[in-house]
């Protein structure tokens, strides 16, 4: 167990360095706005080379383009920002896989991080790399305290700021944003999950390591500590997913992150992850009257965003067209709900991560290169 | 903003319109597109929650600014 500051004579074995020089370096980066507001780690050419040595890719290879800004992130820029974020060089293959996954996911390249919506990148890491670099999959999994989680997530956001210029009050027009914009990176608790890990559900071998990136809006916790009835728990999840406040588009999507205790309630009753997704799809429903009460009972002709039925641009939503107009599904398919397991096995607590867009297709699961730079 | 600049560069007269809440990002976008002096007009925020009559009022208010930038021959 690590000692707390104050337990020992302070700084007894700290490296000797000129604190004023360190502060000058920190202020240099802050003064150039190459930061999310927190201090960054200085990156020299030699330190950058340690990151680039972790991959077989050309430093000039593009990992993500934003054509509307005429800006690109290369392997080199991704490495510089991983260094600034506080990553150790051996985390870099995970950062690269995150960029590959964001490129495959699609929204990041299409101006979503400039939107008033205020979304954040979110990364789910699977496989043996979790243990190799010390990622947290258990207690406080959405919280602070673990360098790999904290800095890999931060590397993505710093790149958005520094390589793409998406600074708040400038090109980032988020109305409120989300605390997840500082960093949002978790590992799946595969060891305490009763099911195969998420990357194995989507064609990879469990011995592979993988990153699955999503664009997220909110992280909402589900308290259900005493239930052992799978339907009760699943209805609690469906009720949270179908909250009307989340409905900007006609339908929404989510990643359900079950605590191990909840996963075992479901698996113990014979439910698979697909069974849970199907149940939630069938029960994440709002009545037409409930939607009318909040002015979201129709959709706009062009954008298909929800608005009141008496709005001049309003057209009927899909539920209206399907012949069951009073029972409106908020998900387009069972695939719009992904399921993973993370957190400590110590209470009946789970979370719904609201992901951006209707989704429903396969998630952007990307394999992490091994140390030799091959996949 | 990008659409307005790209249309102008393609030879199509265009005027970008945004609400005053987007003044800073609009200017930043014009700079990204290498046109920091690009002229556009703003209307008071908000827009999305207005009714038809209010939208028409906004359009009437903004029209002189649009015509000034377009510079039509009288």
Image (spheres, coloured by chain):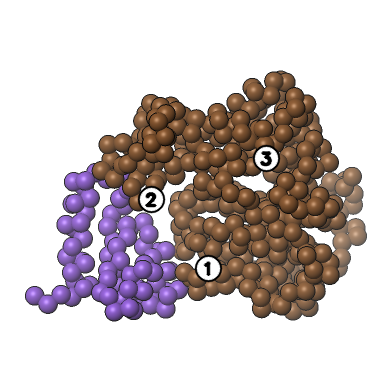
Chain colours: A brown, B purple
Please state if A211 lies on the left or on the right of A248 as rendered. right
The quadrant holding residue A161 is bottom right
Choose between A205 and B8: the one closer to the eye. Answer: A205
Chain of the residue on which disc 1 is drawn = A
- Residue A320, given in percent of the width and then of the height, sits at 38, 34
Q: Are marks 3 and 1 on the same chain?
A: yes
Q: Is residue B67 above or below residue A322?
A: below
**Left/right of residue B22 with respect to residue A48 in the rendered view:** left
Label 1 or label 2, whichever lies nearer to me, is 2
Quarter of the figure that contains the N terminus of chain B: bottom left
Q: Earlier in the sequence, mark 3 or mark 1?
A: 1
Q: Which mark is residue A66?
A: 1
Label 1 vs 2, first from the N-terminus:
1
Using the numbered discs, state the Cα–Cα distance from disc 1 to disc 2 in whole angstroms: 22 Å
Residue at 30% x, 66% y is B16
Q: Which residue is mark 2?
A: A303
Q: Position of residue A321 (x, y in %)?
A: 38, 36
> Callout 3: few (<14), some (14-19), or many (20+) C-alpha neighbours within 10 Å?
many
Residue position for label 3: A339
State the separation of the CA atoms marked 3 and 1: 30 Å
- Looking at the image, residue B58 lies above or below residue A48: above
Q: Residue sitting at 74 percent across and 32 percent down?
A: A263
């Amino acid at each position: 167990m690590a000692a707390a500051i104050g337990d020992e004579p302070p700084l007894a074995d700290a490296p000797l360095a000129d604190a004023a020089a360190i502060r000058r370096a920190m202020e240099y980066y802050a003064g150039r706005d190459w930061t999310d507001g927190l201090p960054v780690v200085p990156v020299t050419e030699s330190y950058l080379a340690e990151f680039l040595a972790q991959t077989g890719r050309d430093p000039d290879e593009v990992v993500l383009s934003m054509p509307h800004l005429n800006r690109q992130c290369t392997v080199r820029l991704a490495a510089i920002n991983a260094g600034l974020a506080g990553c150790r060089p051996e985390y870099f293959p995970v950062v690269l896989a995150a960029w590959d996954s964001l490129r495959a996911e699609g929204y990041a390249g299409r101006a979503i991080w400039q939107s008033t919506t205020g979304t954040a990148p979110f990364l789910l890491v699977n496989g043996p790399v979790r243990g190799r670099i010390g990622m947290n999959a258990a207690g406080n999994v959405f919280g602070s305290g673990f360098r790999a989680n904290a800095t890999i997530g931060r590397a993505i956001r710093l790149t958005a700021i520094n390589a793409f210029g998406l600074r708040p009050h400038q090109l980032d027009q988020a109305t409120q944003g989300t605390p997840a914009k500082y960093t949002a990176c978790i590992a799946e608790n595969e060891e305490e999950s009763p099911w195969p890990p998420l990357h194995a559900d989507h064609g990879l071998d469990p011995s592979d390591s993988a990153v699955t990136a999503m664009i997220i809006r909110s992280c909402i916790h589900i308290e259900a500590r005493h239930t052992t009835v799978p339907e009760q728990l699943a209805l609690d999840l469906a009720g949270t997913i179908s909250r009307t406040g989340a409905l900007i588009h006609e339908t929404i999507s989510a990643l359900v992150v079950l605590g191990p205790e909840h996963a075992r309630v479901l698996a113990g009753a014979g439910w698979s992850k697909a069974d849970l997704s199907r149940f939630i799809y069938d029960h994440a429903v709002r009545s037409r009257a409930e939607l009318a009460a909040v002015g979201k009972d129709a959709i706009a002709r062009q954008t298909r965003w929800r608005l009141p039925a008496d709005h001049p641009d309003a057209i009927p939503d899909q539920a209206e067209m399907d012949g069951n107009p009073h029972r409106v599904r908020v998900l387009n398919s069972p695939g719009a709900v992904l399921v993973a397991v993370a957190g400590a096995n110590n209470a009946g607590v789970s979370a719904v991560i609201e992901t951006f867009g209707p989704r429903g297709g396969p998630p952007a699961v990307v394999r992490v290169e091994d140390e030799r730079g091959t996949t | 903003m990008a659409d307005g600049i790209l249309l102008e560069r393609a030879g199509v007269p265009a005027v970008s319109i945004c609400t005053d809440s987007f003044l800073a990002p609009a200017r930043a976008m014009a700079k990204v597109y290498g046109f920091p002096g690009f002229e556009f007009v703003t209307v008071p925020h908000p827009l999305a929650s207005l009714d038809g009559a209010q939208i028409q009022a906004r359009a009437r208010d903004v029209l002189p600014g649009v015509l000034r930038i377009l510079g039509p021959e009288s």
